[in-house]
Image (cartoon, helix red, strand yellow):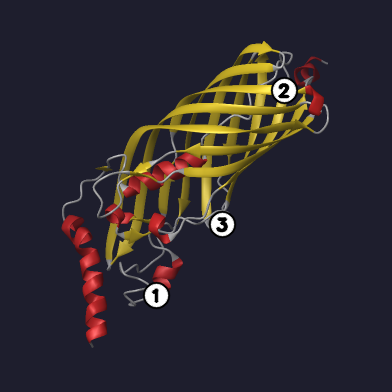
Amino acid sequence: MKIRSFILCLCFTGLLPVIGVWGQRPNPEILDFDRPEAWASKYFTSTSILSSYSPPVIKESGALDLDLEIVDIPELGDSYRRVGFNGTKLEDLNKSPIFVRPLFTYYLKPKISLTLSYVPPIEIWDVTPHIFSGSVNWTFINSDPWRFGLRFYGQVGTVEGAFTCYLKNVAGGDDPLLNPFGCTAVSNDTAHLNYYGVEFSGAYQMKKINGLSTFFALGVNHQLNEFDIHSTLFGEPDIRTQKSNGNTFNLSGGLLYPLTDKIELAVQVFYAPLDVIRFGKSVPENDSLINLRFLLSYSLDNFSKWFKK
């Protein structure tokens, strides 16, 4: 009995922050950019930042690059997943291990190109993305073996899934350890991954190593994040919208290797420092995103000429 009472006491203590705001929640909730919920939003928005794999090479107007990008999404431990209700509720943030998107880069002029990407709403790993992104790219210095460029990019899109009340919670029933917040049904939540930004990048080509290039980039972003909660806690509907916005920056670098005269393979290391004030703490800490990204590119240099024939 003493052990059970102790566990119930712990559960009640953990719910105090929730009880305190349950009856007085504005909708939408405007969150500080370093709150745990806002950190989760900017973490996953950062995974989708449209970072470059070196400034585009100089090509004829009308050329087209067809790319496939695979982005690693690191698995988060429980201390990072505990973000709900200002850092007291564990959320299911380990849905998809990777993010895959196609990219299409069209050369308007030899030094100016346009990149577009669309991820259709196809459910995989229990999440459904629906994301548009794009960039305008300018290679302003092309002095062999160096290239330097600027790109202006942005994204609007959503990812739907059961983040706040997931299957493990619901299956736990009345068990206060497996289902401490009384989830009675799987939630239908929506994360909005919106941003715009600018990036400076450079590349150095080593012709003696079969044209291998090293590249680096620095990006500055403004994120406009939103998270729509649609769940049921303790028999009561929990329908809220949480908004947060702020600035982030990221550093990246890697290698670009030409497999043939038309096919290239690139690998990138991406780093974004992300501040957060966890529950029970008064100063922010840096819970950063570090991941790997891969790109396979195929070039159609005479794409526009097909339509002139």
Residue annotated with mark 2: 205
Residue 276 position within the rendered picture, expressed as x and y whole percent measured from the top left = 33, 45
Residue 34: numbered disc: none
Q: Is residue 184 above or below residue 62?
A: below
Residue annotated with mark 3: 125
**Residue 37 relative to residue 210: left or right:** left
When asked about the image quadrant of residue 85, the answer is: bottom left
**Residue 85 relative to residue 40: left or right:** left
Q: Choose the circle earlier in sequence order: 1 or 2.
A: 1
Quarter of the rendering occupied by the C terminus: top right
Type of amino acid at the residue the image marks with label 3: Trp
Secondary element at tag 1: loop
Residue annotated with mark 1: 172
Mark 2 and mark 3 residues within 8 Å of each other at the beta carbon: no
**Residue 255 relative to residue 241: left or right:** right
**Residue 303 relative to residue 4: left or right:** right
Type of amino acid at the residue the image marks with label 1: Gly
Residue 98 appears in view: yes
Q: Is residue 194 above or below residue 284?
A: above
Secondary element at tag 2: strand
